[in-house]
Image (cartoon, helix red, strand yellow):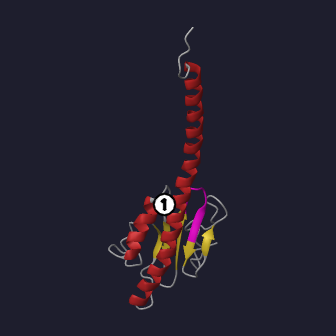
Amino acid sequence: MQKTKGFTLIELLVVIAIIGILSGLIIVSMSGAQNAAKDARIKSAMDQFRSTAEIFKLNNNNSYGSTVGQADCTSVATSIITTGTDGAALCADIQSQGTGTLRINITSTAWCVQKALPGGQSWCVDSTGAVGCINGVGGCTSSLITGCVISDNTCQ
């Protein structure tokens, strides 16, 4: 009897099954990495929003602009997010990441922005310098904007 060299069908099926299991595990772990990357991009853009707001304030008689309550990126009021400003571009970039609306509250003396992150938390940045995660998903408390206090537009 002559013995042929090569792999048997069973050996090939076992190798294919192992490769399938490993690729499945990698795909599952990569979906979490994608959400983490979106979270980081939102946080970075919201930090840049603070610098943009301060520049806007210096260029506009020490004012953040007209009062904009519970706004999103489509606001046309004269403020940090006026169309054509860096604030509008940052606003659109933040809004394009993940789901949920970017919420903004602006008065002439203060502002606050909040966005639900794809990773499952809410992130808030305000004119006082406060920045951070707000008590888990949608855990920000306010009757005007989730994440901003009506009276002083600060993160909670």
Residue at the far top in the pictured view:
1
Q: Nearer the viewer, residue 86 or 126?
A: 86
Residue at label 1?
101
Q: Is residue 22 left or right of residue 69?
A: right
Residue at 59% over, 35% down: 21
Q: Residues within 10 Å of mark 1 (few under 14, many from 20)?
A: some
Q: Nearer the viewer, residue 79 or 126?
A: 126
Q: Is residue 92 above or below residue 16?
A: below
Residue at the far front in the pictured view:
2
Residue at 52% over, 59% down: 37
Q: Nearer the viewer, residue 105 or 121?
A: 121
Q: Quadrant where the C terminus lies? A: bottom right
* Residue 135 % position (x, y): 67, 63
Q: Is residue 136 left or right of residue 100?
A: right
> Total of numbered circles in the picture?
1
Q: Which residues are magenta?
A: 116-124
Residue at 42% over, 82% down: 65
Q: Give the amino acid at mark 1.
A: Thr
123 part of magenta stretch: yes
Find residue 58 and report its image quarter: bottom left
Q: Nearer the viewer, residue 14 or 33?
A: 14
Visible residue check, residue 94: yes
Kind of element beneath mark 1: loop
Q: Quadrant where the N terminus lies? A: top right
* Residue 80 % position (x, y): 42, 78
* Residue 12 % position (x, y): 55, 25
* Residue 147 % position (x, y): 59, 68
